[in-house]
Image (cartoon, grey):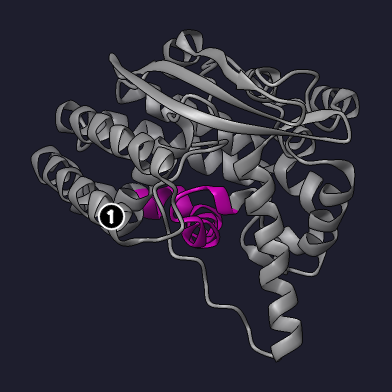
Amino acid sequence: MQRFHRHYWQSFALFLACGLMQACSPCAVFSGEKDKAEQAAAVHGADSPDAAVTDLIAHLRNDDLPAIARSALPAELYGQVEAAWKDGRSRWPLTELPLDDSIPKMLAALTQADAEKKLQQSFAEQLSGQTRALQDAARGLGVFGKEYLGREGHYNLSQRQHYTQLIDVFSSWAAGAPLGDAARGKQSIGLLVKAAEEAGISGDEDFSRLGLDASLERLTPLYVAMKQMLGLYGLDMEATLASVKVETVSETADQAELRVSYTLAGRPVKTLMQVVRVDGRWYLADYLEAARASLAAENTAETTGKTPEARPADTSDAPAGG
């Protein structure tokens, strides 16, 4: 349970707080009809370079996860990823999350029989009142994160600089967050279990059964609950979202570089992101690369007859362009 809780708040804090894949709306209520209407209105790509970022933020403010995936990819690539979801060969964009391979385990824990009772009991026995120990663990995870960034070769320089800033911010935030507070822990578990029950996803096989759009729609209650949970621990994602500024640094016919800045947990973060134009629409280059890489991995497995190795958990944000 201790490992589950630590991995939970770390991975989803990183996911939600990168300034681009987050919107904190504590009063949001999941509505299937609303989400379907918004999804139908979503188009592939953006009209301008900066909109490749701001459109995704708008979808997140509407708690519309399916629209994010649709907007992030050209129609042809989206269709390929969608088909790969059904076959269990791709889990993009979930693979943009740190510790993405732990998501099925987390869902299984939240949907097990008597989940809330069991998790509340485990929290009370192992984590309640252990704020100092959890803060120390957070600092240790920050050190590990920086070491990981330094030795892994699949990050470019801009990404390394960005993610290092995020690790520093989160380590500082966690050092003062009441992570072992009993009341907050109880409320957090209640929020998550209820949302997981509404989502109705208990493991990876459900992702294949539902497919890309339906899976992301089903995950929306959990997305909302996790934002609420971070708010309980003092991480104001709405303030971060409101602070995001996007500036076009350079632009050619089919490429552009953006400077993205925002405030996270009261501290400034800046990064550069690359966007590209495909068939007249603008997309985050990193998203296109990651989606194509997920398909390339599956094609390699088909050719060699071997299952590709699991992608190591990273500290990348989403959508990240650098």
Residue under label 1: 150
Residue closest to the eye, 316 or 282: 282
Residue 287 in the image, given as x and y percentages of width and height:
64, 43
Judged left or right of residue 62, residue 233 is: left
Q: Which residue is drawn at 47% across and 32% down?
A: 16
Which is the main secondary structure of the residues drawn in magenta? helix
Task: Give percent across and percent down for residue 165.
Answer: 29, 32
Residue 40 visible at all: yes
- Mark 1 crowdedness (10 Å alpha carbons): few <14, some 14-19, many ≥20: few
Q: Looking at numbered disc 1 in the image, what kind of residue is underneath it?
A: Gly
Image-quadrant location for residue 318: top right
| Residue 78 coordinates in the image, percent (x, y) | 82, 48
Segment tinted magenta in the rendering: 95-119
Which quadrant holds the N terminus? bottom left
Residue 96 magenta-drawn? yes
Instruction: State the residue in front, 228 or 292.
Output: 292
Outermost residue on the front side: it is 252
**Compared with residue 86, is residue 67 higher up or lower down, i.e. above or below?**
above
Image quadrant assignment for residue 279: top right
| In the image: residue 298, left or right of residue 172 | right
Provide the secondary structure element on which disc 1 rests.
helix
